[in-house]
Amino acid sequence: MQYELKSIFKDEMNLHLTLRKEELSPEAYRHYKHTVMLFDEYLHSINLSEKSIDEQVIETWIKKISDGISINTVGGHVHYIRQLLLFLIDNGYYCFIPKTIASKDTYVPYLYTDHDIEAIFKVADSFTAPHAVKNKSITYEMPLLLRLLFCCGMRVSEAINIKVGDIDFERKLFILRVTKKYKQRLVPFGPELSEIIYLYCVSMGIFNNSGAYLFPENDLYTHISANSAGNYYRIIRKKAGINNLQQSKNGRGACLHCFRHTFAVRSFDKNERRGISQRESVPFLSTYLGHDSLYETEKYLKYSGDYFEDTLTRFESFAGDLFPEVDINE
């Protein structure tokens, strides 16, 4: 049975959900709607009779939903409700805006240094497939795959699902059709990478085959798996001298996905140094990465660690107004 909104703000909530449905992926919208329903149910239960939401209402709701769930889950609920409250404010209602709740996520990704990148590509460009491997094309595929991950910040799953027909050489764009958020998006690439992709497609005999995968496995119409790519990358990483045993206990070490984290941090840093304002840079980066919200991008950039301390400091000075931290037990 479908839940019907009941509180005094039900009409405004329904409108807000209609708008958000157009912006979010189905999975993200499902979580968002669930949070709004929890908040509506609470407002209805306390018989809120005036169209204003003060600090006491918000703090009591946060304490109510915090029972029995992780602080990360509470933080997600608060983040979503902030969006709703801002919408209500824009429509002329008084609402108290709670601070976001600090995540207890201790995961720290590996961020590749310039030395790492140089060593990785040097090994990748001379990589030879092991004798037992049937897919001998992997010798040519890995150097390009790593360049796409490093230069374009794609997810591994997005890169391996690219078909030749998804590459627009004239506009220098990838059309990503298989994404985590189920939303097609465009990812640009530069002239140098364009030339590398072109020569690769010609040498692989797939340039005029729009249905062929860019990274085929046993035939042109099946792509390599993320697991296979990860296994080949481990060989390359070890030969490049990057030892995962030296990494933080909270990290999983250098892996393919860490190229995406490195891309995000470096892009933010590069835009800062070019004089592009943070309020322009972060929303653009969020869209480019295919994130549903700035909250996801904030988590990426907060992983900066020791390699990019200046970048982290500048980001947190920007994000402080958007993502201030608060201990829920205070």
Image: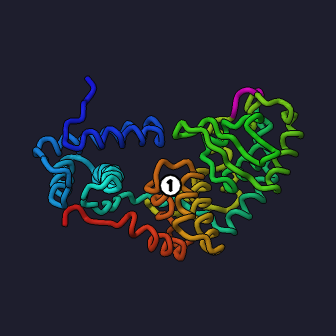
Q: Which residues are magenta?
A: 219-223
- Where residue 26 sits in the image (x, y, percent)? 45, 35
Residue 17 found in image quarter: top left
Residue 162 found in image quarter: top right
Q: Is residue 140 above or below residue 96?
A: above
- Where residue 267 sits in the image (x, y, percent)? 62, 64
Front residue of 133 and 23: 23
Residue placed under numbered mark 1 in the picture: 252
Q: Is residue 195 left or right of residue 181?
A: right
Front residue of 296 and 1: 1
- Count the labels in the image: 1
Q: Is residue 185 magenta?
A: no
Name the chief secondary structure element in magenta.
loop
- Going 55% across and 48% down the picture, which residue do you hit? 290
- Going 82% across and 45% down the picture, which residue do you hit? 170
Mark 1: few, some, or many residues within 10 Å (few <14, many ≥20)? some
Q: Is residue 319 left or right of residue 287?
A: left
Work out whether residue 72 can be spotted.
Answer: no
Quadrant of image for the N terminus: top left
Dot 1 falls on a residue whose secondary structure is: loop
- Going 76% across and 40% down the picture, which residue do you hit? 167
Q: Is residue 62 left or right of residue 247?
A: left
